[in-house]
Image (spheres, helix red, strand yellow):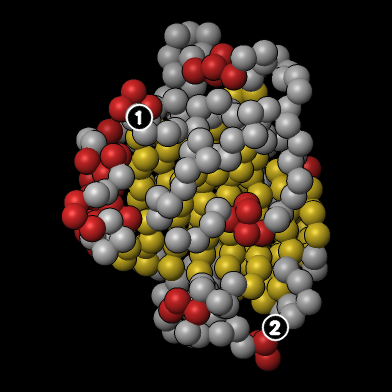
């Protein structure tokens, strides 16, 4: 299966944290935020569009020579991350727009949460490819067909990551949950801070219909737009598990998703029934004779 987005993209060289700042609940600005106050442009052709209300949009572009990318200025251990994205319009086959959280902890064990938007030929739906790496182990791919045209307007894509679960949301609708089953021997990212990256790149060898449809470079440059990055999370000190609980005794961000459990369960069921096109936990070809990963059989 595909390698982690961070490894494939070589987006940046993240140094290990030698010391950590005091534990705090850090909040990145919301509406009207200038993206360049929250993220660093790493490389490639980019646009900066300043809005009349003081906000700022970053356009990442891809041509035959190179793609482009940015990285958030801050990393968190447990966080809710939200970002608005408008994807590449028209014939986007072969292109991949990616936002991913990647670890940069002192143990050098790879953790990553991927949201990869696989381009397609004009008129066909985008595929949202999600994957989770924990303790160096990945291969937890689940794919969805988006139920709207993500190229016509901005939509909000979110990751809620706390000590209990990873929850992926689209326009505040929960589509995927990965629970912490560490006590059952399932790896879960609990020790290392992670930082958001955004990248637009060419993956015509696998992205669209398994690589059968290649990038049409006559359509280049391809551009995806990002705005309104918001982050609420824990910045740990000393020992990473200090973020396991907040000063009032509850889990960091336990209620920050703004979703009650009944509605969340309904949304997850609908996403599974209506929008999921691939789930590693049901791939009997990949895992013959019932040899599915342990988490697939846990509640």
Q: Is residue 33 left or right of residue 189?
A: right
- Residue placed most toward the observer, 150 or 131: 131
Task: Give me the residue at 30% from left, 45% from top.
Answer: 293
**Tally of numbered discs:** 2
Q: Is residue 11 left or right of residue 234?
A: right
Residue farthest front in this picture: 289
Report the residue marked by disc 1: 185
Q: Quadrant of residue 215?
A: bottom right
First of labels 2, 1 by sequence position = 1
Place of residue 119 in the rendered image (x, y in percent of width and height, measured from the top left): 52, 74
Task: Give me the residue at 59% from left, 35% from top.
Answer: 109
Report the residue marked by disc 2: 220
Q: Quadrant of the C terminus?
A: top left
Check disc 2: other Cα within 10 Å, few if <14, some if 14-19, many if 20+.
some
Q: Residue 130, which numbered label?
A: none
Place of residue 221 in the rendered image (x, y in percent of width and height, measured from the top left): 72, 79
Residue farthest left in this picture: 289
Q: Quadrant of the N terminus?
A: bottom left
Task: Give me the residue at 74% from left, 80% from top.
Answer: 64
- Residue placed most toward the observer, 148 or 63: 63
Q: Is residue 121 left or right of residue 279?
A: right
- Residue placed most toward the observer, 26 or 44: 44
Q: Which SS class for mark 2?
A: loop
On screen, residue 123 above or below 298: below
């Amino acid at each position: 299966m595909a390698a982690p987005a961070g490894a494939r993209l070589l987006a940046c060289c993240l140094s290990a944290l030698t010391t950590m700042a005091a534990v705090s609940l850090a909040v990145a600005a919301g509406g009207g935020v200038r993206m360049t106050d929250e993220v660093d442009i790493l490389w490639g052709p980019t646009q900066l569009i300043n809005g009349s209300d003081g906000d700022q949009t970053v356009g990442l572009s891809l041509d035959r020579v190179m793609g482009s990318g940015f990285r958030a200025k801050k990393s968190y251990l447990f966080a809710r991350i939200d970002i608005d994205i408008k994807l590449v319009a028209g014939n986007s086959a072969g292109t991949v727009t990616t936002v991913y959280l990647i670890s940069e902890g002192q143990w050098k064990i790879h953790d990553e949460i991927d949201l990869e938007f696989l381009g397609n030929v004009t008129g066909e739906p985008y595929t949202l490819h999600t994957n989770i790496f924990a303790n160096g182990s990945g291969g937890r791919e689940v794919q969805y067909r988006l139920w709207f045209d993500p190229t016509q307007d901005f939509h909000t894509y979110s990751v809620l990551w706390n000590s209990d679960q990873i929850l992926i949301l689209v326009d505040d609708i929960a589509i995927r949950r990965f629970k912490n089953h560490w006590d059952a021997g399932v790896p879960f990212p609990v020790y290392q801070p992670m930082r958001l990256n955004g990248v637009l790149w060419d993956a015509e060898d696998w992205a669209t219909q398994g690589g059968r449809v290649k990038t049409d470079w006559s359509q280049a440059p391809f551009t995806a737009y990002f705005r309104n990055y918001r982050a609420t999370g824990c910045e740990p000190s000393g020992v990473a598990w200090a973020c396991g609980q907040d000063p009032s005794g509850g889990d960091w961000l336990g209620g920050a998703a703004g979703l009650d459990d009944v509605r969340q369960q309904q949304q997850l069921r609908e996403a599974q029934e209506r929008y999921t096109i691939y789930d590693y936990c049901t791939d009997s070809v990949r895992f013959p004779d019932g040899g599915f990963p342990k988490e697939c059989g846990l509640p």
